Image (tube, rainbow, N blue to C red):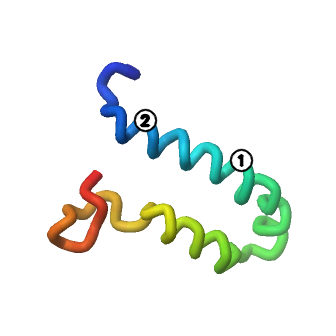
Amino acid sequence: MERFYTETQRMVRESVRKFVATDVLPAAETIDRKDEFPAEIYGRMAEMGLFGTDLPEEAGGSGF
């Protein structure tokens, strides 16, 4: 299955995995307990371009 991914897709996947390991997992218990997702994490996700991944670039997405 790995051979079907582009190099860009593999890089994005690795970046997301690192982000989750360093920013999301350490906060997971608090997120679950409070039933809130911290705005800081949303901000980092936006900085990484993780929103609009399914939209074409001409529509403001990242075109993945």
In the picture, residue 58 is in which quadrant?
A: bottom left
Classify mark 1: residues with Cα within 10 Å, few (<14), some (14-19) or many (20+): few
Q: Amino acid at mark 2?
A: Arg
Q: CA distance from mark 1 to mark 2?
A: 17 Å
Q: Is residue 15 left or right of residue 26?
A: left
Q: Residue at x 84, y 60 (%)?
A: 29
Q: Is 44 drawn above or below residue 1 in the view shown?
A: below
In the picture, residue 18 is in which quadrant?
A: top right
Q: Position of residue 57 (x, y in %)?
A: 21, 64
Q: Nearer the viewer, residue 34 or 4?
A: 4
In the picture, residue 27 is in which quadrant?
A: bottom right
Q: Amino acid at mark 1?
A: Ala
SS state under label 2: helix
Q: Residue at x 81, y 56 (%)?
A: 26
Classify mark 2: residues with Cα within 10 Å, few (<14), some (14-19) or many (20+): few
Q: Nearer the viewer, residue 59 or 7?
A: 7
Q: Residue furthest bottom?
A: 39
First in sequence: mark 1 vs mark 2: 2
Q: Residue at x 55, y 49 (%)?
A: 16
* Residue carrying label 2: 10
Q: Position of residue 50 (x, y in %)?
A: 45, 61
Label placed on residue 56: none
Q: Is residue 30 left or right of residue 23?
A: right
Q: Residue at x 35, y 33 (%)?
A: 7
SS state under label 1: helix
* Residue carrying label 1: 21
Q: Position of residue 23 (x, y in %)?
A: 72, 58
